[in-house]
Image (cartoon, coloured by chain):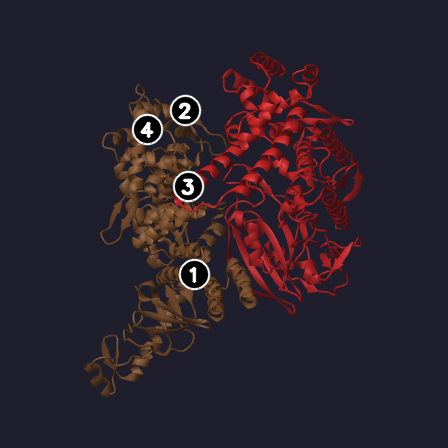
Chain colours: A red, B brown
Amino acid sequence: MRFTTLAFALASVAWATEPGLAAGIETRNGRHQHEDTRLGFRVRVPQGWERIPLQMQERYIVAKYLSDKRYEYPDKASGYDKHNRPFMLVIALPKDGQRGTYTDYKTYLKGTYERAGYHVADEGTASAGDLEAATFDVRTREGNVHDYLDMAPRRITTWVYDLESVRIAVHFEAKEEHVFAKIEKELSRCLASLKPIAVEDALHVCAELPGRGALAALDVKERNRLLRESEESLHARAQAELPRGWKAKRAGRFLVLNHADAGYAKKLAQQGEAVYAWLEDAFPAFAPRGYVRAPILRVCSDWDEAQAMSVGSGFDDASGVGIDIVTYKSELGAQGGSFDRVSTRVKEIWFSEKDPELYATLPRWVERGVHDMLADSRAKGKKLVFKDDDDDLEDLRESIRGGEMPPLRDFVRMSDRDFDALDTGYEQAGLFMQFLKSKAAARDKRTKGLVDTYMNHLVDVVAEVGEVEKKQRAEAKEPETEAEEDALYRERVSRRAGYERQILDETFERTFGAWTDREWRALEKAFRGSF
Amino acid sequence: MLRLETLAAAYLVVATNADILCLKDGRFLEKELARCDGGVVVQFENGEVFVPEAMILEAVIEGAEIEPATQTEREQIAKGLVRYGGRWVRPERRAELIRELIAERRTAMEELRAHRLWRNRYKETTKHFAFEHTIPPNAFAGYRDAMEAYFQDFVKTWRIKLPRKLGPVRVGFHADRESFEQISGASGGTVGFFRFVEPFELNFYFDRRDPRYTEEVMFHETNHYLQKLFELSFHYPHWPGESLAEYYGASVWDPEKEELTTGLAQEGRLAQIERDIAAGKMWGIEELILDERAFEHYTWGWSLVHFLMHHPKHKKRFQKFYVDLARSKKVERYLTGGADPLWTCTQEEVLRVFKVSLRVEKRGLKELEREWHVHVQDLLDNLTVRGLEKAAMQAYWADRPIRARRLFEEAIEAGSEQPLVHLRYGYLLYRDDAFGAAGKAVRQGLEHDPLDPYSYLLLGRILRAKGERDPARKSVQLALELDPDDAWLEESARKLLESIEEQ
């Protein structure tokens, strides 16, 4: 564990301390209070509000609380009745932050709320005992930056206190209409309640990974060492900052942080474990590559809590997708989207940690195929069982009847753009991947191990094309005339556009080059007969 | 227009502190100012900058004095009188009037500055638009009038019967790109948008460095709203929807003559078309129409609409095709999904209706395509200054420096007044170690915008390369004084200053 000075840590990643609750909720004189002995302050929290864990990549929010009440309101935009649970953020802004860090509340807002559209409707100052605070009244244009289905404007009220080496922003957020006025008085009392206290604990800094390019350039041993160090550090932090009521447990590869019932969390972890094992087995071309950090599976008690968890100012870490999987206990049990979410996140994490560069070059039919297939899978013991999605099947059948489903021979050579233009591309990809990985396909000599063969060729082709490109770039002559420059430009454009084509065509050629029309017809027939 | 008592004498007048300079493009400066012939000199810590009268909306100079310039003035001064507002008054009276005027002007300027904040935005409703804006009122007036004229022109040209109960549509007109993004929530390179489900809403921003571009975006986005008026429940497919919006984007409003000209050449789009041709790609009609969301609908698609709208025979047919898509019973439409479904049609159906309307079902599209490509070449052969500027910028960003240099030179020779054109041209010259010519180009650009910090930054680079350390340092520091809030500028300046010190 590394400890550091306040100024550095404020500009860096972490807020958690060693286990021992240096920041947390407590009750004094019957009042709910958040106390932070690392940053030296105490602030009142509305009665009954629950503490929510922070995202792993969070840089500024030091505490988050969610209202225990659901406020129902009619949503004008959608015409439906909806509910809102207001939340509170405590944000720490370093006074001497490094370049690119948020050192004041307005910059923080700009960096984190811009996509929702907002303006500061009022600002001023207010007194809270001996302290002076800057006050902000903010209105979002519509909805919520973290949920685009949520269209009703929000109101944010914030007081920012200038402590010795840090600014603390106490930020409340609720729907402007129907909700805010109901809680305004209580929020005002909390906003004005901040008190400085003695700093007693040190800050903890997580091990940061270098950028994606730099990480990819390292030799495997060094890269894996850094990934292991990062994993250890992230796991320690996630456990250290766990709010009351949450339980931490290691389940196989997963660190499970649970706020729902233990049985449900166990099933989700089993699902993740089975997906992981399936990927290791199904994609041997990827399997021996980089170290995959053990994912942190957070099981929230409900959808609202999972939504509140997603509020933050962090960014994905250097590996590209982070290792957090946030889900919740769905009333639909194993039928709910939580299982789909765990499966698809494990797939993202697995591929991107193994080899982010190669993952980015996966043809759509493979990438979407695996995604769709895993979303429709459920663990049975240690194995995965794949089920057909009735809607997908019906859509694909409709596409076949309308003559719109492209033949497989064209489908596996499609560019991303052409694939995305298909109405049922995802469904076709999912069912085709499922077919290729089925027992029936394994019995046919044409399709037995076909995905492995394709992936091995893809790995080779990507490496070869990369080498040729590197050589061409090194040998390119600087143009001296406009005509030479035009010619170079033409070549560059066609090379760029041709890169994807070249990879698709060459991999196709090496995998299917010897296939006859008859074999393609047979594959088509077998595939269509599988659903 | 607000204007402080003109001090036209050919000398500087000593001014005290707390002066304010407000430019027509909305920028404010609180620096020591001095009047001089043809403008104002702004005193920075790292140098003086002359700002020409043409850029100034208002200059408040504390304690400004008038020197006698004529015999009459000398005689009146001899009587102990001073001139103020076209009259000769006692000095005490004039001092009092100036104090009042300065206080009044200062209040007006502070009000202007305050209005840059969205919470203090101006609100003005015309017959068809409900504007909410934070741009200087003098700049806004022209856009407001242009929008009304545009609405009426479009409705008349396309013979639109306005839907009943059509109230003024809300327009968010923002002071700059940063506030546009922050307040409207736009991101990812969006420069304006129309919210096409009710309540309709338009949003765009004022680009002080390129007011013509502001107009293009405004006309483009507003066109999406105007297209709605054919049939409120219909949503035009990407082609021809975006292409017609681009066609109308190239409209110009003449405030003097109160005249709107539509369907001009989209010079920036032409530059992109040229880039495609250079890369060996000529788009065909069929592939263009069948693509659901091609970026080329803004470029090649626009040129196709431009060709059809400027062709005596095709114009009427194209207009009928356009209206038919939304209204004809013979067109097959479907409902889009989502919370606010709208009718639309597939690109295949668009192509079918297009062929029928243009009467090329039997002959095919080849002949029409050939005519269109000739039209494109004609447009490319007749680029205006703006076209040259845009083409040069395209070449610059596409890493074609030789071509960019030639086009920048042609644009400057043709009279380009875009500071950015001079700046980029200067940078290319600097990159080629032509430091003398690079410095000259940047200084030329500064004549058009003497307060552009990036020009001083580049000048600092050039001076450093020439070994002139002190002037280089001053130029970079002046850039920082001009815009202390630009993080990117600050970072570049810091590195440059370090390299000057290491030299």
Q: Marks 2 and 4, how far apart in space? A: 18 Å
Left or right, B319 with reference to B241: left
- Pointer 3 residue: A486
For residue A109, side relative to residue A245 (left or right): left
Residue A70: percent from the left, percent from the top? 63, 43
User: Extreme left residue here?
Assistant: B72
Q: Amino acid at mark 4?
A: Glu
Q: Quadrant of residue A143?
A: top right
Question: What residue type is disc 2 on?
Answer: Glu
Chain identity of mark 2? B
The mark tally for this picture is 4
Disc 3 to disc 2, C-alpha distance? 35 Å
Q: Nearer the viewer, mark 2 or mark 4?
A: 4
Kindly identify which chain the residue marked by label 3 belongs to.
A
What amino acid does circle 3 point to? Asp
Q: Residue A80, image x and y in percent?
A: 54, 36
Provide the residue designation for mark 1.
B435
- Asked whether A432 or A493 is in front, the reply is A493
Tell whether label 1 touches label 3 (CB within 8 Å). no
Mark 1 nearby-residue class (10 Å; few <14, some 14–19, many ≥20): many
Residue B369 shows which numbered tag? 4
State whether discs 2 and 4 lie on one chain: yes
- Dot 3 falls on a residue whose secondary structure is helix
